[in-house]
């Protein structure tokens, strides 16, 4: 396929504000895509050259990209930067220069462009910045203006397509299997392998049955199983029967992959974090004798002498790129291992938890840096209540309670795993993670920062859309507004993003990317908001929302609280 043809599709997708249209355009593109290029096109749609867990980044700074554009079209960098400042987007600035300079366009294929982008990403060592600039600039010289617009956004990590994984899966199903009904098996394979390009390539080459045979593999993160909520020990036993109750550690999730000579670790967001935790790699090599294994764990700073768990704010200091060795000395981590998903060449995810916990005992018989989670089989709610008290008194968040017979459902959030935290009656017992969708310009003091309220939403997993749940303004400090502006202004849009469903039109739309943690007094029914809206037009809203924190990069917009969770929290509140 020609790269210019691909960018015409990008152009169409960027302009649409309907998700259904997005699926249709994408599926039309997929129908035309040959076997040899489908994986590459899928990665490019995700704004990448490889799956998320492969740290192959094309990252270039704005200044560098501006220099490439300037050199390609023989203008000054100032002129390009001027265009960028005016148009607010480097893609448009490149397009503008290309239109003026009329380069000699060659007919490049997606493959050819992809190879050069890979070369840019793999460039390292001395003179990297210049080498990357040259490669990009030489490529721009051979392209039409529209291709240039979309090309330069790739190294900036700003493709603006706003396409979520479920939309890509819907479109694949529609293109290859006739309708959207096969999204589920495709999604399950994606949950096991986290590699959308692999799913596409396998579907194109071997059909659905090939995709269904894709197994868990060491080195590819498995999408994490997540927890539902229930309000009390009684409700838990009533709904789940006999359970395995485990401490809920408040650190960060680390999936540990070990082969004979290598250990790699992945975050909940599927990013590679091996280099961040050298002590956990060491410990895995020492403590785990098995040839190959995948473990699920929570890493946090813990003092075994005093039996103290350090607060999350401390642990999180370890998520950093520099001074790693020094921090590892100062604040060594332990990994509390709570599951085993793979052992010596075999996936264990379809085995019941009861068996996996037995296997884990064999594979990790003794605690050291890796520590097997404390767990207990319980069927009496009173004993569960006591264990919860015990966890709270140790400074832990609470418990995670799991169905003994359940398989490991990659990527699922259901009642196989339930979190139990302490709460007091009449209040919500948990915060929500909301996505910023826009801001509404205010009057008075706030106008200095250009915002009066934020429009925030939750994620509707079924329709792969973001739906509104609240406006939040009061209680944000000037500092917080500044932070929001710093992050939001780069991704503001002049039209509603395709995957946003809102009755309220804010002053400025913001691409759904920034996740904030919000505490509210109550969830109420609301005719205004679109979250969980029924036929009669009533949705759900937050009463007295306040900002608790900005979520880190660990939470993608699709990891925000879902509509199902919101409704469940509504049902449970005040019980
Ligand atoms: P939050 O960030 O508010 O905790 P979340 O959706 O990221 O929300 P929860 O659903 O509250 O996470 O809790 C699940 C998380 O708890 C897991 O992702 C994991 O990181 C952590 N965790 C700690 N201990 C356990 C355990 N024993 N079993 C499973 N997960 C655990």
Image (tube, helix red, strand yellow):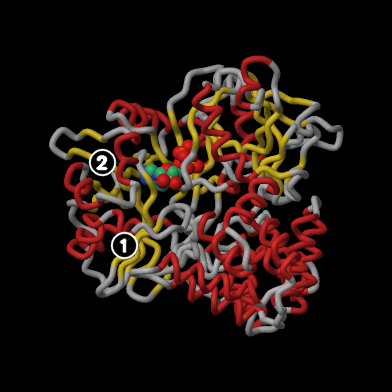
Q: Secondary structure at mark 1?
A: helix
Q: Nearer the viewer, residue 299 or 55?
A: 55
Look at the image and tell me whether residue 244 can be seen: no
Q: Earlier in the sequence, mark 1 or mark 2?
A: 2
Tell whether 186 sits left or right of 377.
Answer: right
| Residue at x-position 43% and y-position 65% | 129
| Residue at x-position 48% and y-position 76% | 119
Look at the image and tell me whether residue 150 can be seen: yes
| Residue at x-position 64% and y-position 80% | 37
Tell whether 500 sits left or right of 327.
Answer: right
Q: How many marks?
A: 2
- Locate residue 106, reporting x and y percent: 70, 82
Q: Which residue bears the numbered disc 1?
A: 359
Question: Mark 1 or mark 2, which is nearer to you?
Answer: 2
Classify residue 376 by image quadrant.
top left
Answer above or below: position of 300 versus 104. Answer: above
Q: Secondary structure at mark 2?
A: strand
Which residue lies most toward the right here? 536
CA neighbours of label 1 inside 10 A, class few (<14), some (14 to 19), many (20+): some
| Residue at x-position 63% and y-position 56% | 80
Which residue lies most toward the top here? 444
Q: Nearer the viewer, residue 330 or 281?
A: 330
- Locate residue 291, reporting x and y percent: 27, 74
Classify residue 487 by image quadrant.
top right
Q: Which mark is residue 301?
A: 2
């Amino acid at each position: 396929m020609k790269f210019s043809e691909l960018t015409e599709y990008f152009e169409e997708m960027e302009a649409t504000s309907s998700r259904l249209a997005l699926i249709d355009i994408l599926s039309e593109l997929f129908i035309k895509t040959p076997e040899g290029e489908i994986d590459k096109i899928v990665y490019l749609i995700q704004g990448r050259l490889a799956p998320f867990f492969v740290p192959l980044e094309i990252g270039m700074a704005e200044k560098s990209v501006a220099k490439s554009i300037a050199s390609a079209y023989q203008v000054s960098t100032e002129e390009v930067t001027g265009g960028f400042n005016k148009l607010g987007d480097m893609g448009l600035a490149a397009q503008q220069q290309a239109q003026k300079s009329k380069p000699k366009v060659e007919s490049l294929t997606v493959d050819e462009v992809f190879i050069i982008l890979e070369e840019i990403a793999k460039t390292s060592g001395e003179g990297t910045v210049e080498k990357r600039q040259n490669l990009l600039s030489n490529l721009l010289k051979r392209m039409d203006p529209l291709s240039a617009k979309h090309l330069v956004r790739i190294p900036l990590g700003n493709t603006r397509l706003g396409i979520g994984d479920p939309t890509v899966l819907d479109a694949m199903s529609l293109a290859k299997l006739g309708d959207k009904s096969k999204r589920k098996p495709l999604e399950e394979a994606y949950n096991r392998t986290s590699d959308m390009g692999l799913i596409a390539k396998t579907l194109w080459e071997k059909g659905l049955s090939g995709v269904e045979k894709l197994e868990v593999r060491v080195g590819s993160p498995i999408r994490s199983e997540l927890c539902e909520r229930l309000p009390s020990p009684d409700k838990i036993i009533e709904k789940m029967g006999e359970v395995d109750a485990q401490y809920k550690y408040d650190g960060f999730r680390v999936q540990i992959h070990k082969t004979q000579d290598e250990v790699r670790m992945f975050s909940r967001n599927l990013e590679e974090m091996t280099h961040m935790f050298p002590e956990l790699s060491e410990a895995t090599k020492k403590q785990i004798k098995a040839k190959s294994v995948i473990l699920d764990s929570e890493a946090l700073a813990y003092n075994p002498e005093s039996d103290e768990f350090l607060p999350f704010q401390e642990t999180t200091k370890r998520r950093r790129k520099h001074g790693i060795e020094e921090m590892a000395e100062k604040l060594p981590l332990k990994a509390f291992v709570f599951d085993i998903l793979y052992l010596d060449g075999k996936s264990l995810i379809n085995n019941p938890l009861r068996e996996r916990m037995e296997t884990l005992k064999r594979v990790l018989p003794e605690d050291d840096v890796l520590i097997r989670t404390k767990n207990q089989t319980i069927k009496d709610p009173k004993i569960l209540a006591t264990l919860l008290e015990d966890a709270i008194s140790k400074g832990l968040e609470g418990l995670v309670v799991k169905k003994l017979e359940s398989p490991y459902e990659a990527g699922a959030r259901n009642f196989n795993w339930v979190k139990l935290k302490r709460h007091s009656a009449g209040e919500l017992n948990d915060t929500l993670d909301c996505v910023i969708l826009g801001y509404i310009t205010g009057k008075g003091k706030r106008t200095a920062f250009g915002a009066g309220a934020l429009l925030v939403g939750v994620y509707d997993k079924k329709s792969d859309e973001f739906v509104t749940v609240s406006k939040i303004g009061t209680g944000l400090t000037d500092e917080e507004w500044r932070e929001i502006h710093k992050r939001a202004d780069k991704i503001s849009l002049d039209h509603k993003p395709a995957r946003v469903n809102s009755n309220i039109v804010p002053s400025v739309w913001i691409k759904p990317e920034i996740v904030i943690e919000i505490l509210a007094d109550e969830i109420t029914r609301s005719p205004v908001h679109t979250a969980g809206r029924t036929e009669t037009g009533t949705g759900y809203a937050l009463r007295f929302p306040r900002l608790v924190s900005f979520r880190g990069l660990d939470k993608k917009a699709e990891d925000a609280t879902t509509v199902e969770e919101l409704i469940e929290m509504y049902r449970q509140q005040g019980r």
